[in-house]
Image (cartoon, helix red, strand yellow):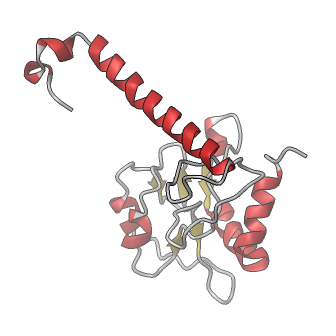
Amino acid sequence: MKRVEEMGLWERLYFPEIIRGLMVTGYRFWRNLTIHTLHLFGLAKDQEAAITVQYPDERIPYPETFRGCHRLTLKQDGLVQCTACFLCATACPAECIYIDAGYEIDTLRCIYCGFCVEACPCDAIRMDTGVHPANRGFTRQDFVETKEVLMERSRELEQKGKEGLYEEHVRRYQHV
């Protein structure tokens, strides 16, 4: 982004920039509409156009590297693997992880960067659930995930698998 001092008069007027943005949007709209129409008639098969996925009824699978909801991994005896070394909280740029006689993640502050996962020396925190973060309530406290919630997410992943968790997650958004 250019500083105001570096902008010329033409750029400072904003109107030309609005027109330029509308031209880009219009170009993409008409290009995609034309290509999709040609595809209906069996033409222009070598050209790709943008597609819209009708979520949640349709689905594009998440890649293996997708950073979904957090979870705490468990030991064989069911206890959490976290040793409270504070490395995840230190690595978090949004400062949304709190370890104070427990474990909390404020998902409203979280930017889902994955630094906490990479910083953890004992592989105690992961973001591999395959579930996209969702609206879990209407107050700020509803979005604070405690140690118990994160441990339960690990148990559910073990029982249901990624597909089972995803189907359960999407069911509440589907139009039946």
Q: Quadrant of residue 158?
A: bottom right
Q: Position of residue 170 (x, y in %)?
A: 77, 54
**Residue 42 as seen in the image, left or right of residue 106:** right
**Residue 103 as seen in the image, left or right of residue 153:** left
Q: Quadrant of residue 34?
A: top right
Q: How many marks?
A: 0
Q: Position of residue 143 (x, y in %)?
A: 62, 45
Q: Nearer the viewer, residue 119 or 175?
A: 175
Q: Residue furthest left?
A: 5
In the picture, the quarter occupied by the N terminus is top left
From what the image shows, is residue 118 above or below residue 59? Answer: below
Residue visible at 62% across and 57% down in the picture: 146
Residue visible at 61% across and 37% down in the picture: 140
From what the image shows, is residue 41 above or below residue 6? Answer: below
Q: Nearer the viewer, residue 21 or 146?
A: 21
Q: Residue furthest right?
A: 176
**Residue 87 as seen in the image, left or right of residue 74:** left
Q: Residue furthest bottom?
A: 76
Q: Position of residue 38 (x, y in %)?
A: 61, 46
Q: Position of residue 138 (x, y in %)?
A: 69, 34
Residue visible at 70% across and 45% down in the picture: 136
